[in-house]
Amino acid sequence: ELAEHQLSRLILRFVMLWLTGGTRVAFLCFFASHIPITLFIDGQAALPHYIYPRIVQDLLDWYTGTFKDHLMSRPHDLWFTSIVTCELIFQVPFFFYAVYALSNPARVCGKGNFRSACIAYGAHTSTTLVPILTSIANDALLTTPEMLTLLGFYLPYLIFPFWLLVIAVTSDDVFQAKSKTKSS
C-alpha cells in the first residue's frame, strides 16, 4: 500500500496531473484549436461536401495531396466516417465545455461533471486513435518519412486525451493537485 502511494505521488509529480499553470494553458490551446479543425477539416469526412465553402474543401485537398493522408482523402472509409461522426456529435460539445472550464476554472468544479466528462472524452478519444494510428503506420502507399509526418500530426490527438484521462482518473479535482490515493 505504501509503495502504491509512493508510485502514485511520483506519477503526479512527473506529469503534472492537474489542470493548472502551463498544463491548463496547453489543454486550453489544444481544445480551442481543435474546434475549427474538427468542424472545417475533419467534418468533411462525415458531412456532405456541399455544406463546406470551396476554400475549406480546397484546404483539405491541399492537405491530403501534400501529406498523403489517405484517411482524409475522398472517398472515406466507412469506419473512419463513423469515428468522425462520433467526434462531431460527442467531442465538439466537450471542446466548447473544456474551453469554458479551462478559461474559468474558478467557475467550474473540477470534481463533478467536468471531471466525468474528461474521463469519458479521454477514454473515447484515446480508443478511437488506435485504429487511426494503426492504419497510418500500416499504409503501404506511404514512405517512412510520410508515415512519420502523419503520425506526428495525429499523435497529439492521442497524447492530450490520454493525458487528460490520467489526470481525471488520478485526481479528485482536475484543477488541483490532490491525488485520489489514500494518505497513510
Image: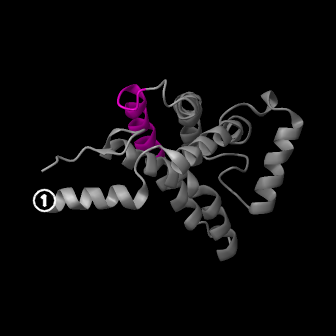
Q: Is residue 110 magenta-colored?
A: yes
Residue 53 in the image: state x and y as whole percent: 85, 32
Whether residue 143 is visible, yes or no, is no
Camera-nearest residue between 172 and 146: 172
* Residue at 72 percent of width and 42 percent of height: 41
- Does 43 appear above or below 140? above
Is the N terminus in the top left, top right, bottom left or bottom right quadrant? bottom left
* Residue at 31 percent of width and 46 percent of height: 170
Q: Is residue 25 magenta-colored?
A: no
Camera-nearest residue between 50 and 23: 23
Residue 120 in the image: state x and y as whole percent: 40, 36
- Does 65 appear above or below 126? below
Within 10 Å of the Cα at label 1, are there few (<14), some (14-19), or many (20+) other Cα atoms? Answer: few
User: From the viewer's perspective, is 73 left or right of 59?
Assistant: left
Camera-nearest residue between 151 and 178: 178
Camera-nearest residue between 67 and 92: 92
For the rendered model, the colour scheme is one colour
Which residue has dot 1 on it? 2
Q: What is the span of residues highlighted in magenta in the rendered image?
A: 109-125
Q: How many callouts does the rendering have?
A: 1
Whether residue 147 is visible, yes or no, is yes
The amino acid marked with disc number 1 is Leu
Kindly report the secondary structure that dominates the magenta region of the rendered protein: helix
* Residue at 57 percent of width and 28 percent of height: 100
Q: To which quarter of the image does residue 10 belong? A: bottom left
- Does 133 appear above or below 18? below
Which residue ends up furthest to the bottom in the rendered image?
144
Residue 18 in the image: state x and y as whole percent: 42, 46
Residue 92 in the image: state x and y as whole percent: 59, 31
* Residue at 56 percent of width and 58 percent of height: 155
